[in-house]
Amino acid sequence: MARKARKISPTNYYHLMMRGSNREKIFKTDEQKIQFLELLKKFGSEEAIEVVAYCLMDNHVHLVVNGEIGDLSASMKRISIRYAMKYNKETDRIGNVFQDRYKSEVIADDQYLLQVVRYVHNNPVKAKMIENTADYKWSSYNEYINGKVKLLSKKQKNFIMEFFSGDLELFKKFHQENDLREYLDIKEEIKYSRLESAKKIILDYEITEGKAGTDSVQLTSNPEYLDGLIRKLLEETKLSHRKIAELLEISSNRVHKASIK
């Protein structure tokens, strides 16, 4: 069966993700992460690919890049093949290191570009590996903050910072904003992200809509508050009626009734 052609971005900006085969780790040591970044810098430069943002997790990689789709495909292929050869040799294994070919999504406008950069940098925070984005050493966040560009395109870094008038504090505050939007990600992380978003919505709703001293049980037993909370969860998350019912400890039929009011 022929592979589906990749969508071409009108801006030449793309969000990419590479993940380990069978959900396995692709990085077991810091040295392996360094090797991957060196390959990205080498082959990205040779194929005229400019790196806007990156984040290396243990079993997957997120990249935001700018370049022609043909050059992008060529560079990613060279990187994945070369890294897999090194990884298999070092770990005495055979077989695929990466699962299929890399995933990609088009970034069609400046607003989404900024949102994706933030999402990529905040990946370790979302995964609860760290509390602050600046504490993670394997993303491009600190290249924006400390001015020491190692892998980022200086041109692209300057372009991103223009949206914040070069103000690092505005850049930092932007990364602290809550974002419920879903981006290109692995299935397990999407599911986890939806649940975490739902829990935050429930907590915030209890605080803003509940009366002083109102606990969760009292709030969900109030039909008016409960209907509002259910509709908010349905609107702002993609959780099923069943999953929302489980979170609120009510019946799926109750969720369905609120959804059609």
Image (spheres, rainbow, N blue to C red):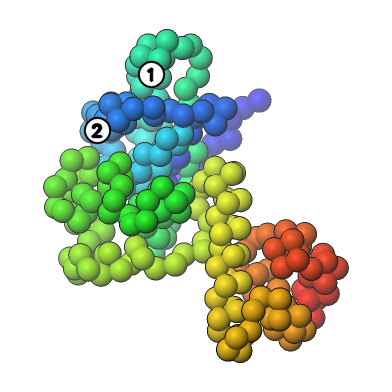
Residue ID for mark 2? 41
Residue ID for mark 1? 87
- Position of residue 33 measured from the top left corner of the image (x, y, whole percent): 31, 31
Tell me the element at label 1: helix
In the image, taking residue 128 as reference, residue 68 lies left or right, namely: left
With respect to residue 46, does 146 lie above or below? below
Assess whether mark 1 and mark 2 are in contact (beta carbons under 8 angstroms). Answer: no
Q: What is the residue that sits farthest to the front in this orientation?
A: 213
Q: Amino acid at mark 1?
A: Tyr
Residue 242 in view in this figure? yes
With respect to residue 113, does 100 lie above or below? above
- Position of residue 61 measured from the top left corner of the image (x, y, whole percent): 41, 38
Q: Nearer the viewer, residue 11 or 39?
A: 39
Quarter of the figure that contains the C terminus:
bottom right
Q: Amino acid at mark 2?
A: Lys
Quadrant in which residue 58 is drawn: top left
- Position of residue 92 measured from the top left corner of the image (x, y, whole percent): 42, 10
